[in-house]
Amino acid sequence: MRKFLYISIVLSLCTLGKVYAQYDVHFTHYWNMQNFYNPAGAGATGKLHAFGAYSNQLSGFTGSPKSMLINADMPLSMFRGDHSIGLGVLNDEIGMFTNQHLFINYAYAMKLFGGRFAIGAQIGLLNAKFDPSDINLGENSDDPAFPSSAVDGNKFDFGAGILYQHKYFYTGISSLHLNAPLIEMGETNEIQIDPYFNFMAGGNIPLKNPLITIQPSVQVMTDFVSYRTDITARGSYNYNNKVFLGGVTYSPKTSVTFFAGIEFLNITVSYGYELFTSGVGAENGSHDIYIGYDIELDMFKKGKNKHNSIRILQ
């Protein structure tokens, strides 16, 4: 899907000078990335949650999309109430385009119906760059509608979302690029980033065997012109202080994704391979790597730190 987006952007720059594009990246491990898809997901784990994700999509194609995300979020326990903050930076390369997104999220949560309800807001900066140095336009090389050298532009960006978490399930919805930012690239070209909506829900189903847990989830991304749905069945097995992860995701009319990973010492490492069902070939799928780190963090805990004196014990 993003390959055809790349082609359409190039053609549009050559003709119209203004592009309407789906801007956002889909990662295989979406359920671990609430802070990226939903501002209300900041602080959702109740810990310092930091992760990096890398996706090489449609591998084997020239100019195939490559995306890298660094992200962190945590609760702000120095304030009264349930406040959280998150931040992240995304670098997304699609052929001759390089898109970057720097964002900060804030979320406030309250107890509701035995769970946690959070509302969040996002402010970010979008930057887009186009480098046509690898294009040979032939006789049309002097076309004023097409940039002869690298052009870039940036724009502020806003988003919002809500998230409800319960012991056995969670659900949330968000909208990013609410202000529909228009990025001007040079004097004659523009990229219009349309708002898009993201719905995510998941469950935590314990079995009679306490070492095994089933965790289904679903994600829907849409700008009301195109959409993508991911339905995931995943499970975990706890053995010898390690948790082994695995599962499969089905995206109707798009792909089937297989993934496996491990959790140990607060670290999660997982790999996924997306196999497209649209006929691009099994060898031209997408590789997705996720590395996460979670730790309890309460630097502003109230009360005195108790300790034993070695001198008294002597």
Image (tube, grey):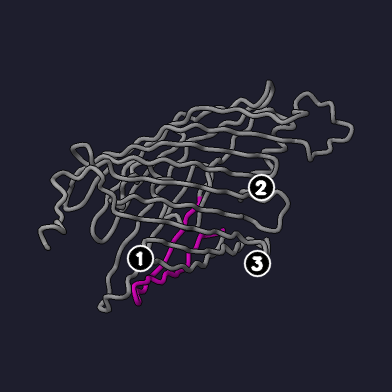
Q: Quadrant of residue 209?
A: bottom left
Q: Position of residue 246 (x, y in %)?
A: 44, 70
Q: Position of residue 45 (x, y in %)?
A: 31, 52
Please name the residue shown 48% across and 28% down the image: 156
Residue interval drawn in magenta: 228-254
| Circle 3 crowding by C-alpha within 10 Å: few under 14, some 14–19, many from 20 | some
Q: Position of residue 260 (x, y in %)?
A: 48, 69
Disc 1/disc 2 C-alpha distance (Å): 33 Å
Please name the residue shown 53% across and 47% down the image: 25
Answer above or below: position of 229 versus 92: below
Please name the residue shown 78% across and 36% down the image: 133
Q: Which residue is mark 2?
A: 4
Q: Residue furthest left?
A: 312
| Disc marking residue 282 | 3
Please name the residue shown 64% across and 27% down the image: 185
Disc 2/disc 3 C-alpha distance (Å): 18 Å
Q: Counting residues from the N terminus, which is met first, the one under dot 1 or under dot 2?
A: 2
Q: Position of residue 131 (x, y in %)?
A: 72, 35
